[in-house]
Amino acid sequence: MIRMTEPSKITSVPDHQPAAGGIAARARASVGPKYLSGLNPEQREAVETLDGPVLVLAGAGTGKTRVLTTRIAHILSQGRARPAEILSVTFTNKAAREMKHRLGQMLGHAVEGMPWLGTFHSIGGRILRFHAELAQLKSNFTVLDVDDQVRLLKQLLQAENIDDKRWPARMLAGLIDGWKNRGLMPSQVPSGEAAVFANGKGGKLYASYQERLKILNAADFGDLLLENIRIFREHPDILRQYQQRFKFILVDEYQDTNVAQYLWLRLLSQAPSFTSPRVRGEVASRSDAGEGDSPSTELVETPPHPDLLPASGEKEKTKNICCVGDDDQSIYGWRGAEVDNILRFEHDFPGAKVIRLERNYRSTGHILAAASHLIAHNEGRLGKTLRTEDQDGEKVTVKGSWDSEEEARGIGEEIEQIQRKGEKLNEIAILVRASYQMREFEDRFVTLGLPYRVIGGPRFYERAEIRDALAYLRVINSPADDLAFERIVNVPKRGLGDATIQMLHDHARKRRIPLFEAARAVVETDELKPKARGSLRDVVAQFDRWRAQREVTSHTELAQIVLDESGYTEMWQKDRSADAAGRLENLKELVRSMEEFENLQGFLEHISLVMDREGGAEDDAVSLMTLHSAKGLEFDNVFLPGWEEGLFPSQRTLDEQGRAGLEEERRLGHVGLTRARRRAMIYFATNRRIHGTWSTTIPSRFLDELPAANVEITESKGGSAWGGAGGYGASRFDDMEAFGSSYSTPGWQRAQANRNRGGGRTGGSQSGGFEEETASFSSASSSGPDFGSFSSRRRGPLTIEGELVAKSTGTTSEFSLEDRVFHQKFGYGHVTKIDGNKLTIAFDKAGEKKVVDSFVQRA
DNA sequence: CGGGCTTCTATTTTT
DNA sequence: TAGAAGCCCG
């Protein structure tokens, strides 16, 4: 099932309604000040401070959405603005939907008049459609998905004769996306950065990509905002029009905004002085800069952009912008979010009122204390202290297990116990760092017959069958949509392979016509082999027929006809694979969902922005998801497995982002803990299988950062994890070692040695009797070792590494040039360069890598 | 052109 | 380990 945010309603609302006094009056009469009554003083202040810039720092569970919606209700009921004069942006469709829903509950049906409540992209897209010609587009432009984007770039790479193995199109797509996130048009990309791709051709490729987009009448997600910014800058009159229209601006999740979104908001909110964030350079250049600790964004005061100055004679307008966010929940730095936007707010909007919401209505005392304590280890934060008036509740538990399988078994049992107590599975969630962790839980739940659902994963519109179906419709709607045409011309198989496509391309390029027209022309010649020619002719004829049919058939029926006549449905009906039935079901759902739109055009315009993942989750089931996708959700019981160094915090983040990365990981931990209302249960395993091979891990440094008073440590009986008594004989790992598998590699041995050193116990002293052990997995010693013991166990070099990474200062390395070293992942090598605690090492097998010194040891 | 084989690589994700 | 992507041959 897919849901969408009634886009037909959005489009059907006129921009300027005749005085909406009716709605305001209705709101005033029916709601009165009642909507303010349940608010605490801070929330109330956040709602009632309507004039001037406001930053609401809303910690987890402090009633953020409530404040936002009540604020809108307040604005309306005070008659300060009409619904169409409030710009209210969120990141996800889900959040937008939620706000609409809550508003609807408060105001009755007045929400339908909120045309400017939506995601950054849907609103940006909407504005862009109004002024498409200023971006060399037509108002019916297509929004490309990532697939299309990559395919287009691949073509450009081929045209430039660039080896797309060495310089993958995906990578370029990522770069371009990053530039767009930072508000950079092709001409503005720093030349050094543009040069990193394909020996200096990066910038040029970005430029030609943009050109191609215009020709295809297409925009990618980044363009939806970037083109807005450009239009606003180049056409002050248009900008002013929007500035005047939006009397109030509200922004949700401000900590997740990227530079482009920030600029967009700045323009619309008409602020007088202008801060140009000089955006962080690429990771490499930053670490090269030596002190990796300088803030990632420098503030550069620039004179106000002319557009931002008040019109002559006009008094500077008040900027009624209200941003709500939580710097401690910023977890999307890796995809361009700039925490600095929120950290800089007071600077950007002088005279801003900052309101902290610190009263948490979600979690019990122990959970909140644990989460607060953990996040207090971060340096770059605005600082909030969450408090609750709830009881202390149960302590957060930390449990160690021998390996990830045991972890999954233990959690499975714990869940069954909770279930036996009569609690709902819907109130149980497992939050993992990386999605590959999910598998083990799924396996376990299947054996146990425990209902579960995975949240996240591939979205509805990312599925191949949906994209294919959409591609057919796109070609019907706009014959010039080459990317769509190319996608389905040979799906189902029609014997039109690469060679045919290539020749169509040549033809199209020579005559500067779309592929579809090229196909029509080529069919008339004898350039193709008879077989291909015949099929291609059929395809062209089919599309002609469908386009004609469009005039007389409803778009829903047309879609059904297309899917049937093209043989697409049949293709999946014949498919023997397990998911074929599901795909057919999805196609049906797609057709069904089209009914909500007025016509094909409207459907295609909104579908890419608004389509959501399947949402029909009515059954009682355990939720399984990543920490990232858990943001914004809450559960009575939260399981947090995999708190091990390397996995959480993620090694890769540490390697690539240093201290900033560590802090983001810590925020992720904070997000995880604060999802729990009543019980939070953390797990770590001593051994984990990663990419098919077992490796030994040590507990996450974050465990050390939890406050002892609020945490209870339990270990699996028989010492199957850290610090246990052991003595049950050889573990299966020891057995495997005997078979000469990878467990006898230096890495494994080093890990064992590490473990011994850290744990102060004999290595490999594990019980072989897993089954009996896990039976008492959860009820084992509740009076485990005192908390300090975690630290004492972690006296190995990796702990020190934690500190070094955390501080990331230019500490002099204990290594010298040419030292022979060993790295757990890359093997042996020698030091070729030293830069503070960062070493460049030429590894025998893995080649040259940059590594923080504490990740290696002398060999 | 398409099927089967080998090779490679391996967070987090929205729009 | 496992999935995807590329490669070669019929």
Image (cartoon, coloured by chain):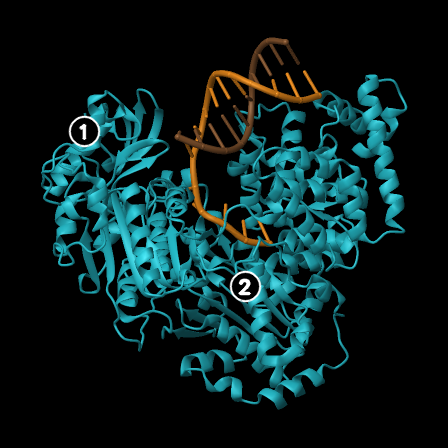
Chain colours: A cyan, B orange, C brown
Neighbour tally class for label 1: few under 14, some 14-19, many 20 plus, Cα within 10 Å: some
Q: Nearer the viewer, residue A165 or A711?
A: A711
> In which quarter of the view is residue A202 placed?
top right
Residue at image point 81% right, 43% down: A476
User: Which labelled disc corresponds to residue A825?
Assistant: none
Of circles 1 and 2, the one toward us is: 1
Please name the residue that numbered disc 2 is placed on: A95
Q: Is residue A806 visible?
A: yes
> In which quarter of the view is residue A638 placed?
bottom left
Horizontal and vertical percent position of residue A514:
80, 35
The chain ID associated with circle 1 is A
User: Which labelled disc corresponds to residue A734?
Assistant: 1
Quadrant (top left, top right, bottom left, bottom right) of the C terminus of chain A: top left
Left or right of A323 on screen, residue A379: left
Left or right of A34 on screen, residue A84: right
**Gap between marks 1 and 2, in whole Å?**
50 Å
Q: Nearer the viewer, residue A328 or A609?
A: A609
Left or right of A153 on screen, residue A659: left
What kind of residue is marked 2?
Ala
Work out whether A610 lies above or below A103.
above
Residue at image point 66% right, 77% down: A109
Left or right of A123 on screen, residue A848: left
Does dot 1 land on a helix, a strand or a loop? helix
What kind of residue is marked 1?
Asp
Q: Is residue A821 visible?
A: no
Horizontal and vertical percent position of residue A569:
71, 39
> In which quarter of the view is residue A753 placed?
top left
Work out whether A601 lies above or below A318.
above
